[in-house]
Amino acid sequence: FEPYHIRAVAEELATERGYLPAASVKHGNWGAGLEMHTKPWVRARARRDYWEKLKPASGRPKCPAMSTPDSWGVTKGHADLMQHKEATSLDELKPLFEKAKASH
């Protein structure tokens, strides 16, 4: 295991342990750091639901053979790709979550 694996396991066990690990002060849970990304499909990953339902295509038993694209349909210069100076608000993230659900 790498240190980030240990931190992730400790964060998942925080309710049982009663506290978060020390390394969590620099790290947002469940992809919270992705909220400021320029690409909307990456911002849509900034939630627990996405990471819990992720099925990595790794060749392990019961894993999919290949990944599937999200098909967001935006290209360079699209308004959805503009960088924000502040973190994306929940109101801005909700349409992204809905679009991500619709594509799966």
Image (cartoon, rainbow, N blue to C red):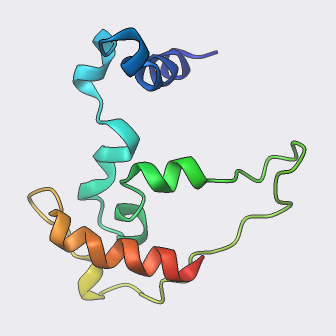
Name, please, the residue furthest toward the left: 85
User: In the picture provided, is 37 more to the left or to the right than 84?
Assistant: right
Q: Is residue 95 above or below residue 52?
A: below
Q: Residue at x 45, y 16 (%)?
A: 10
Residue 18 in percent (x, y) is at 32, 11
Q: Residue at x 39, y 78 (%)?
A: 98
Residue 79 in percent (x, y) is at 23, 86
* Residue 80 falls in image quadrant: bottom left
Residue 34 in percent (x, y) is at 33, 52
* Residue 89 falls in image quadrant: bottom left
Residue 66 in percent (x, y) is at 80, 64
Pick whichever, 8 or 12, lies toward us. 12
Q: Is residue 14 above or below residue 65?
A: above
Q: How many marks?
A: 0
User: In the picture provided, is 6 more to the left or to the right than 19?
Assistant: right
Q: Residue at x 22, y 21 (%)?
A: 25
* Quadrant holding the N terminus: top right
Q: Residue at x 87, y 47 (%)?
A: 59
Pick whichever, 45 or 98, lies toward us. 98
Pick whichever, 81 or 31, lies toward us. 31
* Quadrant holding the C terminus: bottom right
